[in-house]
Image (cartoon, grey):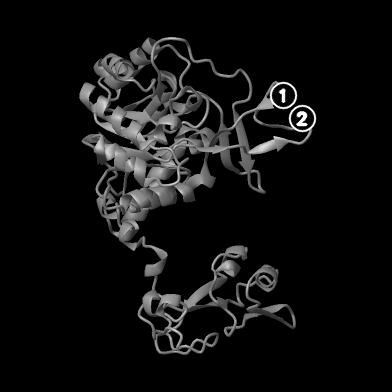
């Protein structure tokens, strides 16, 4: 099987699969079970400063969004950082570190935004022998109201300032965990780099309310008749996470900055996509909370088999998709495709016809015997029919060859070099006389 050994910031782990800072990494017992199951690394649940204790709710902490088959698509969580004493956590981290030298062990941190608080906690964790620290600048609930978490992560100047403190007072590699609750993810990443961060991790959870109880009229999860916004995670957030990872990977100001990818990693394919966009490791949480720690064995075997089939190494996969991420105006408008329906695979359900007829371009005809065919003169290759078809690969998009005439537009495929010369672009049209 392909070698999945990972070196991230000089931190070696047997595979790139790390458990994210979250309830599954809250204590020694959990982390031991995770390492026994095969996880390559763990980010210990966020530690806070000594002082007034953190108090979590003693009631439902998670809301959920399900698919039609009751498959969990997303979790909303209102749990705070660890509510266990700091010294208890530090003692447990030491024991785990000494027993599992071959695994990555990172400590997540969140304290008030002042230099002394960061200096103090960094001094306390130095002798744990952990591999690094992850600065939790992303938590959107509970702690943000106290001036921490995403309240820091939304202000690039604070990110840069705190990161400088951490680099000044700690020997350990520093990973800055970014919040997605911001308009431009590149700005906090650039601030982290200016502050001396060794890497960034993203995304943290998304501010959300997943549902409203229509009997009590309270958001869920509900605590004594009231609800609160929380952090959304799970498979549903993966597209958002991939986009933000790509934005950082292709931004000249952050190019080459190591990334630990987080957000909806559920299968080996998800992990491979994050790695192809430049991630050095991938962090997961909801998948473990759904299926247990041993799910990592499927992730490991799936990624290994994929690499073997492709004949590539993990390092060759890393970042391979980044050059293919571009802005819309650089897309090739010479490329023209048309939908094709395989009559051998079609089950005659008519979903493609209904979707296209009612909401798109009226490009699918229904003939006698519910035979569905594509009207190429109307088809714009929008791909909606592919996405609503219940049979995989029954409908495909077939590219037209250069020199053919598009029956929809009458244009010869390949006539225009790019958007700058395309007649649909107002800037390319001749000025009115």
Q: Residue furthest right?
A: 215
Viewer-proximal residue among 146 and 83:
146
Residue name at image x 37 percent, y 52 percent: 246
Residue at 38% of width from left, 80% of height from top?
Answer: 421
Q: Earlier in the sequence, mark 2 or mark 1?
A: 2
Residue 151, relative to residue 258: is it above or below? above
x, y percentage for residue 287?
50, 38
Where is mark 1, residue-wise? Answer: 225
Q: Residue drawn 44% across and 37% down?
A: 204
Residue 56: which numbered mark, if any? none
Residue 313 percent across, percent down from the top left: 26, 53
- Whether residue 369 is visible, yes or no, is yes
Inter-mark Cα distance, 2 to 1? 7 Å
Which residue appears farthest toward the front when viewing the image? 433
- For the residue pair 330 and 336, the one nearer the viewer reads as 330
The mark total stands at 2
Seen at 42% across and 9% down, the residue is: 51
**Which of the two residues, 356 or 283, is positioned nearer the viewer here?**
356
Please indicate whether residue 410 sits to the left or right of residue 94 in the image: right
Viewer can see residue 171: no
Q: Is residue 379 left or right of residue 155?
A: right
Q: Is residue 139 above or below residue 5?
A: above
Seen from the viewer's position, the closer of residues 72 and 358 is 358
Which image quarter: residue 216?
top right
Q: Secondary structure at mark 2?
A: loop
Residue 294 x/y as whole percent: 45, 35
Pointers 2 and 1 in contact (CB under 8 A)? yes
Quadrant location of the C terminus in the rendered image: bottom left
| In this rendering, position of residue 378 left or right of residue 130 | right
Which residue carries the number 2 mark? 216
How crowded pointer 2 is (Cα within 10 Å; few <14, some 14-19, many 20+) is rated as few
């Amino acid at each position: 099987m392909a070698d999945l050994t990972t070196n991230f910031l000089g931190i070696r782990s047997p595979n790139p699969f790390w458990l994210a800072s979250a309830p599954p990494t809250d204590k020694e017992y959990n982390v031991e079970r995770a390492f026994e199951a095969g996880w390559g690394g763990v980010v210990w649940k966020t530690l806070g400063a000594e002082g007034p204790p953190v108090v979590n709710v003693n009631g439902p902490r998670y809301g959920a969004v399900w698919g039609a088959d009751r498959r969990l698509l997303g979790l909303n969580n209102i749990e705070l950082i660890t509510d266990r004493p700091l010294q208890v956590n530090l003692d447990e981290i030491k024991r785990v570190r000494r027993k599992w030298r071959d695994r990555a062990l990172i400590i997540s941190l969140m304290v008030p935004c002042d230099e002394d608080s960061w200096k103090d906690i960094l001094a306390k964790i130095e002798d744990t022998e952990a591999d690094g620290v992850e600065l939790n600048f992303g938590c959107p609930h509970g702690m943000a109201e106290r001036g921490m978490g995403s309240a820091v992560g939304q202000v690039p100047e604070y990110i840069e300032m705190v990161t400088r403190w951490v680099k000044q007072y700690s020997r350990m590699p520093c990973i800055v965990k970014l919040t997605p609750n911001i308009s431009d993810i590149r700005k906090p990443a650039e601030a982290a780099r200016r502050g001396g961060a060794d890497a960034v991790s993203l995304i943290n959870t998304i501010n959300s309310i997943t549902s409203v109880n229509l009997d009590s009229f309270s958001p869920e999860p509900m605590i004594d008749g009231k609800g609160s916004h929380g952090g959304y995670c799970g498979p549903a957030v993966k597209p958002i996470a991939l986009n933000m990872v790509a934005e950082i990977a292709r931004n000249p100001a952050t190019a080459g900055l190591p990334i630990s990818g987080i957000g909806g990693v559920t299968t080996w394919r998800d992990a491979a996509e994050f790695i192809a966009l430049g991630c050095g490791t991938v962090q997961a949480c909801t998948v473990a909370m759904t299926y247990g720690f041993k799910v990592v064995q499927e992730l490991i075997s799936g990624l290994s088999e994929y690499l073997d089939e492709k004949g590539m190494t993990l390092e060759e996969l890393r970042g391979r998709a980044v050059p293919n991420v571009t802005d819309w105006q650089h897309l090739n408008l010479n490329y023209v495709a048309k939908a094709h329906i395989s009559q051998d695979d079609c089950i005659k359900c008519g979903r493609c016809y209904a979707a296209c007829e009612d909401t798109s371009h009226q490009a699918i005809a229904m003939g006698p015997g519910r035979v569905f065919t594509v009207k190429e003169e109307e088809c714009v290759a929008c791909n909606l029919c592919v996405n609503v078809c219940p049979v995989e690969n029954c409908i495909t998009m077939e590219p037209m060859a250069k020199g053919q005439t598009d029956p929809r537009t009458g244009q010869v495929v390949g006539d225009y070099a790019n958007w700058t010369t395309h007649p649909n672009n107002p800037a390319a049209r001749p000025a009115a006389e």
